[in-house]
Image: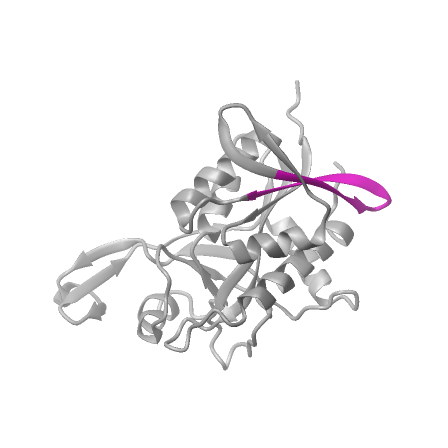
Amino acid sequence: MKNRYNTDVALLTVTSTEYRAVMHFHDWKAKTFVNDEQIYDVATFESNGKERSLIHAKIGEMGMTAAAATAMKVIFTFRPRYLIMTGIAAGVAQEDVEEQIYGDVIVPDIVWNYSAGKFVSPDKANITYGNIGFLPRSSYESIPEEIMPLIRKAAESDDNPCHVYIGPMACGSTVVASRELLEKQVYSQYRHTAGLDMESYAVVYSANHSSDPKPTPLIVKSVCDFADSNKSDDYQRFAAYSSCEFAKHLYEKVLPMDD
């Protein structure tokens, strides 16, 4: 018997601000299962004249471990066609590559783990922090190539209310408020990196390495700060809202929902 998708779209968020933004866009109903402490939010949306299924799960804590665990649970429980993470990220595109402002949407074509590596003595590494050297062992996951032309078309559409930048997303295990770390660990490996967060790599990895039918993973996050000493929470609500706005535009008007 051929494996089939049981849900059209699954959304993931992690912070309370991101959760409230998602809740704003649909009429949700809570759903629970025996022996599963996770609360799932269930709704419908219309795409191409048909009613489609939508679920949401809030990840219990920040970071890649919790994101991977929740993503895999959602995949196996609901078998979604698309697994989309919305929310906030740091804008880190260099000025000569792309101008970024608060609320700009970042949709990565690849996500990569900048924090993987080995700490060594400084004489054995090109990346050094005082008396500590770091040898990066970064790994990356790609968004399926066939979906990216649709994202680019959506970004350029007159119906899209957001400014969208497509480029690499860096993912690590800690909050970053240091330009030195960006220069040494991010730009030195992927100069054209557009955003930085703490969960995207785990979500895409989970989707790409799940059993069939694999969901198509998408990360749709918006700039709330710039990962420097001026980091603040002032624009998180605005960024969370704009990421949901573009994600909704994608699954209602752009992404194919039928085999």
Nearer the observer, 136 or 241: 241
Taking the spot 53% from the left edge, 61% from the top edge, the residue there is: 88
Q: Which residues are magenta?
A: 41-57
Taking the spot 66% from the left edge, 22% from the top edge, the residue there is: 2
Question: Where the N terminus falls, by quadrant?
Answer: top right
Instruction: Specify the farthest residue to the top.
Output: 1
Q: Measured from the top left, where is residue 158 in percent x and y?
A: 79, 69
> Which quarter of the figure has residue 137?
bottom left
Nearer the observer, 207 or 227: 227
Nearer the observer, 6 or 120: 6
Left/right placement of residue 239 relative to residue 225 reads right
Question: Where the C terminus falls, by quadrant?
Answer: top right
Q: What colouring does the structure picture have? A: one colour
> Which quarter of the figure has residue 133?
bottom left
> Which quarter of the figure has residue 175?
bottom left
Instruction: Judge whether residue 109 can be spotted in this image.
Output: no
| Picture layout, residue 31 above or below residue 13 | above
Q: Measured from the top left, where is residue 164 in percent x and y?
A: 63, 67
Taking the spot 21% from the left edge, 69% from the top edge, the residue there is: 128
| The magenta stretch spans residue 76 | no
Taking the spot 52% from the left edge, 69% from the top edge, the residue there is: 224
| The magenta stretch spans residue 50 | yes
Instruction: Specify the farthest residue to the right.
Output: 49
Left/right placement of residue 214 relative to residue 5 reads left
Left/right placement of residue 222 relative to residue 173 reads right
**How would you classify the magenta stretch by its main secondary structure?**
strand
Q: Measured from the top left, where is residue 66 in percent x and y?
A: 42, 43
